[in-house]
Image (tube, helix red, strand yellow):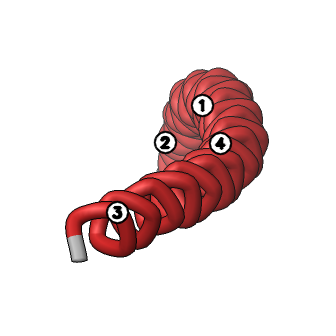
Amino acid sequence: MRKSFSLALLVIGLFCMTSCEDLEKKVEQKVNSINEKVLKLDSLVNKEFEKVDALDSLIEKEKGKLQKLDSLVNSTTNQVDSLVQNKVDRMNRIIN
């Protein structure tokens, strides 16, 4: 009786250990799968951040060009206004 009880305990213990090992393997596989997905997602996020940085750099470059163009337009406008004002003044002097 004692031998059969010991044998039963041994069989139950082996069954539990085998079940725990299987469960451990399944958990490890899930953790590895999640880690792979996290790495892929991290890589994707980094690529998108690089795109945003490149776009931001391009925007800043174009902003600089626009500022130069705006300055040129203002300067040209001032010159044209001055020329027109001189002509208007001359015309007023001739008329008066």
Check disc 4: other Cα within 10 Å, few if <14, some if 14-19, many if 20+.
few
Of residues 16 and 81, the one nearer the viewer is 81
Res. 29 in view: no
Of residues 5 and 93, the one nearer the viewer is 93
Mark drawn on residue 94: 3
Nearest-to-viewer mark from 2 and 4: 4
In space, the residues marked 3 and 1 are separated at their CA atoms by: 68 Å
Q: Secondary structure at mark 4?
A: helix
Disc 4: which residue = 69
In the figure, residue 24 lies in which quadrant? Answer: top right
Res. 73 in view: yes
**Residue 66, x across and y down, in percent:** 61, 44
Of residues 70 and 75, the one nearer the viewer is 75
Disc 1: which residue = 48
Of residues 59 and 95, the one nearer the viewer is 95
Horizontal side of 59 relative to 68 (left or right) equals left
Three-letter amino acid code at the position of disc 3: Ile
In the figure, residue 54 lies in which quadrant? Answer: top right
State the quadrant of the C terminus: bottom left
Mark drawn on residue 12: 2
Three-letter amino acid code at the position of disc 4: Leu
N-term-proximal mark, 2 vs 4: 2
Q: Secondary structure at mark 3?
A: helix
